[in-house]
Amino acid sequence: MNSPIASEFLGGGAARPARDGEAIRLVQASVRYRVPHERIGTFKEYLILWLQRKVKHHTFWALKDVSLEVRQGEAFGLIGQNGAGKSTLLKLVARVLRPTSGRVWVKGRVAPLLEIGAGFHPELTGRENVYLNGAMLGFTRQEMDARFDHIVDFAELWDFIDAPLRAYSSGMWARLGFAVAIDAEPQILIVDEILSVGDEAFQRKSLARIQGFQEQGVTILLVSHNMGVIESLCQRAAWLDHGRLQAIGEAREVIRAYRQSQPG
């Protein structure tokens, strides 16, 4: 992949140097969105209202002043309810977003498993989509030739690989996207709720693959609502709520604090 080995994304705020042994560091990282008050159906409608100065927005902070560090080779979990800011934080680390303020520092080649199958085209065959998705991830044609058989083996889709993707079930689509994304040599693996991809057997195989990365010393940043997965895979975890960091520390203790905060 062509991701830089080390990078810093800056918003506002004071700089702070990263320490040795850290793969990821966030310092007072915040992400702000401006959301229209009214539901606007089309871009044309939005443009007309904007020209008439009738578009009113409210400010929404998806993340607010979040500071944390993930050590090289560590498996680190993110927990919290929907809308807590977990996926936004992952997108900062994956370099999909830049912070509104604060600093995000990443050291290592990143493989983001965020939206599985994003970029697939339904009218192209599975084979064509593998090469297309590989190119989007930064691989050359020759590199994808070398990876292709392993990808299709992992996805278990040889019988359908030359069929158009529109004929695939949603599970088959996700399995192929996962197989392409996971067939990399990352130093940092970002995983967002993808361990529910496919049937139970495929989920076990996917989990085993991630555990294999863990044994190789790959840094893993994992979001899941499955507390058992977080507790079994992660040494430490952070709990986010409405964009703010509530707790960070040993995974079992953070999970206990999160559960105690839930009603019922």
Image: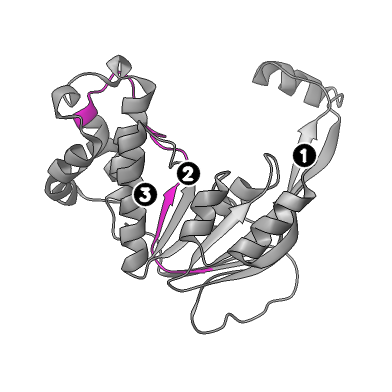
Give the residue type that dot 1 points to: Arg
Rendered position, 48 above or below 107 = above
Q: Position of residue 118 (x, y in %)?
A: 42, 34
Of residues 165 and 213, the one drawn nearer to the viewer in this rendering:
213
Q: Is residue 168 left or right of residue 68?
A: left
Of residues 194 and 118, the one drawn nearer to the viewer in this rendering:
194
Residue, disc 1: 34
View extreme (bottom): residue: 20
Residues at discs 3 and 2 in contact (Cβ within 8 Å): no
Residue, disc 3: 207
* Res. 114 mark: 2
Give the residue type that dot 2 points to: Leu
Q: Residue at x 56, y 52 (%)?
A: 90
Q: Residue at x 51, y 84 (%)?
A: 20
Mark closest to the chain's N terminus, 2 or 1: 1
**How far apart are labels 3 and 1 at the CA level?**
37 Å
Say few, some or many: other residues with alpha carbon within 10 Å of mark 3 (under 14 / 14 to 19 / 20 or more): some
Q: Quadrant of the C terminus?
A: top right
Span shown in magenta: 106-127
Q: Residue at x 38, y 64 (%)?
A: 109
Would residue 212 be visible to someone looking at this image?
yes
Mark closest to the chain's N terminus, 3 or 1: 1
